Image: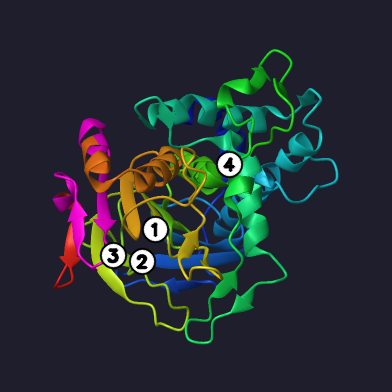
Amino acid sequence: MKKILLSFMIMFIFTTLIGCNPKPDYCIEGSVKGVYLCTKEWTTLFDTRISLKLYVDSKDRYKVADVYEDVYDLLLKYHRYFDKYNPYEGVVNVYTINQNSSETVVIDEALFDAIEYVLQEEQTVKIGNDNLFNIALNPILKIWHDARENAACTTDALTAQSVCPVPSSEQLNSSFNINPNDILLNRNNLTIAFAKPNMSIDLGGFGKGYAAEVVTDYLDQLNIKYILNAGNSNVKAGGINPNNSDGYYYIALIEPNLNAYASTTYFIYLKVSGGEAIVTSGNYQRFFIGQQDQKIYHHIIDPRTHYPGGEVMSVTVISENGAMADIYSTAIYLMTLAEGKTFVEATLGLEAIWYKEDGTVEYSSGFNQYIYQLFPNR
């Protein structure tokens, strides 16, 4: 990621290192003298709430307002690139590609890089010969999306969750062209095409992580200390925290709960160094209750079955690369707990914790180093 984006990042460095005066109304004094905590939030990007906290001290020489402006521009750019539901004037994005699936489409290099990246990396998360992460799965994801948005959906009075008709087995067992090898990229011409009809792509499974990695690469180039939080499921810290004597960042993981009325609680506090991404995938984040069977149907679809998969409520992974952490968390969630542990132990620089249906947790052998407080009965 950093090599791909290096020249892009350099363009920003000379426009932002122009002196620091941390006095905007979104900055407050920290617990350490001379440290300011500056926070801005955006609610219209990637269908989630994104916040960026900057830890500014007397050594910093950047303009806080300019950094936030640049970060917003980057997030907006990738939000538009990865959007499969909406067109934007002057932007060729995933929506454009899918709407013109029978044609060869010229795309911007930044979007090309993202698609090329995920096609290469999704090959690393397999069980046997089966890909557990597949951007070509969109024809099946559309069936589940349409089910969640069905006009026949109702709301459960006790949980405030949607109750919707479940797609039929005939729909889901139809023949789909979802082989990622049929996505044809040409770097010389910056084009994408599909080898077979009725294909389409979805970048939502790694889009937030990839965009977060672009943003944090930019922040790292400026030696900024930060926490970027994309919807509580995708967090990355950077630099040595000047507001804590130990230099660490402390991050809480939300306890999974299927009841929308339940108050937010946490099951663990993590202690992480700058440069580490924490990404969670779970069945409680986007789901509906089946009208026919009252079962939970969440949004993480197993490419092998075309149905929601996984046997735990959530898995949280820690990795240096936020884009890969997004891919890993999705794929590992679809593995059995035993398969997931084996995969994590065999993958350098990757650790994980699983939250099970009974409220207990299991974690990989190296995860202990990140545990600050694990609440009792876990």
What x and y, as percent, mark residue 102?
A: 80, 27
Q: Is residue 344 magenta?
A: yes
Q: Which callout, 3 or 2, points at the residue further toward the start of the chain?
A: 2
| Secondary structure beneath label 2 | loop
Q: Quadrant of residue 235?
A: bottom left
Picture residue at 25% right of the left edge, 31% below the top? 348
Report, in whole angstroms, how far the alpha carbon at label 3 lies from the one at label 4.
Answer: 28 Å
Task: Check contact, mark 3 vs mark 2: CB within 8 A.
Answer: no
Q: Earlier in the sequence, mark 3 or mark 1?
A: 1
- Give whichever of 192, 182 is nearer the camera: 182
Farthest residue, direction bottom: 157
Q: Which residue is mark 3?
A: 357
Which color mode does the image show? rainbow
Which residue shows up at 49% across the image and 45% down it? 209
Report the span colored magenta: 343-368
- Which residue was labeled with disc 4? 173
Q: Residue at x 73, y 39 (%)?
A: 93
Return the x and y of residue 147 as percentages of the image width and height: 64, 60
Confirm whether the magenta stretch covers residue 83.
no
For disc 1, the marked residue is 58
User: From the image, which quarter does the C terminus lie in?
Assistant: bottom left
Q: Disc 3 versus disc 1: distance between alpha carbons?
A: 47 Å
**Mark 1 packing: few (<14 Cα in 10 Å), some, or many (20+)?**
few
User: In the image, is 42 to the left or to the right of 3?
Assistant: right
Q: Which residue is mark 2?
A: 34
